[in-house]
Image (cartoon, helix red, strand yellow):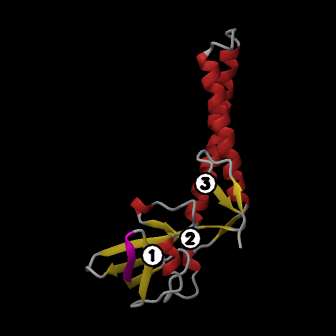
Amino acid sequence: MSQLTNSDDDDDKPVKVGPNYMTPNGFATMVAERDHLRRVERPKVVNEVADAAAMGDRSENAEYIYGKRRLREIDRRLRFLDQRLDRAVVVDPKQAARTDQVFFGATVTAEDDDGNQRTWTVVGEDEADLSAGRISHRSPVGAALLGKRQDDEVRVQTPSGVKCYYVIRIAYS
């Protein structure tokens, strides 16, 4: 059973303690964001705050107040990224030993009872983006897909009731 802790994320979302599974692409994206914030954004904002502080009265200095707020946001995001990357476990879908079942990193095409097809890639929580077809392995659909094979039925509880899908194709790229 995982514990929940408050994160330092901008949205103050709870973060699960334990491994943070990610694809190599998701890991690289998160590292790039952290490095950009640490090497480019933060030094730039620190200079802006220093320049604004040199202008005098800080209590009515909008540039100074905004700069300090932006610096806190950057530091909060850096703490969150460091926390997530420290627990990162990179899983490369190209190294999947079995490609006949849905595991982390699989791209799955499924069809519902009405004949509508959907394609999802099962990824880590930090990589999920439904509009891009990437769903978390912990989401209801992602969790229901794990372990399924082609032609298996997948039943998912949704707010509007149980939705049934049939796995049509499983691919690892």
Label pair 3/2, CB-CB below 8 angstroms: no
Give whichever of 10, 29 is nearer the camera: 10
- In percent of width and height, residue 25 lies at 55, 62
Give whichever of 6, 75 is nearer the camera: 6
Query: In the displayed structure, does residue 16 sit left or right of residue 106?
Result: right
Quarter where residue 36 is shown: top right
Q: Relative to 106, is 63 above or below?
A: above
According to the picture, the residue beneath numbered tag 3 turns out to be 30
Q: Nearer the viewer, mark 1 or mark 3?
A: 1
Q: Relative to 151, is 51 above or below?
A: above
According to the picture, the residue beneath numbered tag 2 turns out to be 138
- In percent of width and height, residue 103 lies at 54, 80
Magenta stretch, main secondary structure class:
strand
Does the segment drawn in magenta span residue 147? no
Question: Circle 1 — which element?
Answer: strand
Query: In the displayed structure, does residue 106 sit left or right of residue 49?
Result: left
